[in-house]
Amino acid sequence: MEDAHTLSRRSFLTGRATPDVAGIRPPGVSRSALEACTGCGACVESCPTGIISLVRSVPAIDFAAGECTFCGTCAKACPEPVFHQQSVRRFPHAVSISLGCFAKSGTACQSCGDACPEQAISFRPRIGGPFVPELNEAACTGCGACIGVCPAAAIGVAQRGDVHA
Ligand code: SF4
Ligand code: SF4
Ligand code: SF4
């Protein structure tokens, strides 16, 4: 299975930052723990923001559908030993803002900053153009709230320490 970094890299190479689907596991699920998943779908049905679906019979998150609030409902709903970490408040990934961002190409937009619950995206003033978004990777939990709201589909997940901003 491809990891988030691979998908993000491809997205940037093709000029299209996707809200990635395959490979993003619910919070608290390790790759190896997925072997215990029976594909029952209990986590899918439990998620209040509707961002979990079964991809190749294991749970995967689609941030295009919404954000993770780290509510822990999926972990509680799962009858198998898949969720090894409880009360997780952070994903292994962060996000990355590509050059497809409207603000970077001259059209004012601050939707991602408005959506971020962690104030991890600030806007840097510049002469002769709209403010441009800058990510504070340390503050980013990877929740995905900024991804679906971006009108340019310019935000994707990225491995921490490898942000293409
Ligand atoms: S922690 Fe809550 S919002 Fe996040 S994937 Fe699980 S059920 Fe959905
Ligand atoms: S993924 Fe990071 S930058 Fe985006 S809304 Fe969540 S905390 Fe903010
Ligand atoms: S929401 Fe998208 S287009 Fe708007 S400032 Fe953020 S990254 Fe740029």
Image: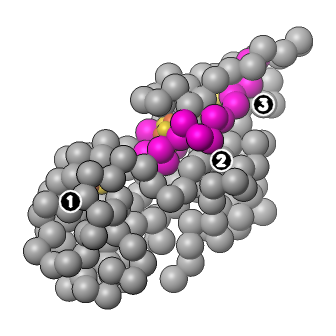
Between the residue at mark 1 and the residue at mark 3, the CA separation in whole angstroms equals: 37 Å
Please indicate, yes or no, whether residue 81 appears anywhere in the rendered image: yes
Which kind of residue does numbered mark 3 sit on?
Lys
Look at 52% across and 26% down and name the residue there: 119
Q: Relative to 128, is 140 on the left or the right?
A: left
> Which numbered disc, 2 or 3, marks the residue that appears first in the sequence?
2
Q: Magenta residues, as a range? A: 130-147
Question: Mark 3: which secondary structure?
Answer: helix
Residue 146 seen from this side: no
* Residue most extreme to the right: 128
Q: Which residue is mark 1?
A: 74
The tag on residue 104 is: 3
Looking at the rendered structure, the secondary structure element under dot 1 is: helix
Asked if the magenta segment contains residue 71, the reply would be no
- Which amino acid type corresponds to the residue marked 1 in the rendered image? Cys
| Quarter of the figure with residue 75 | bottom left
Residue drawn at (47%, 30%), measured in percent from left and top?
A: 118
43 vs 126: above or below? below
The residue at label 3 has a CB less than 8 Å from ligand 3:
yes
Q: CA distance from mark 2 to mark 3?
A: 13 Å
Q: Nearer the viewer, mark 1 or mark 3?
A: 1
Query: Which numbered dot is residue 96?
Result: 2
For this rendering, which residue is in front, 149 or 84? 84
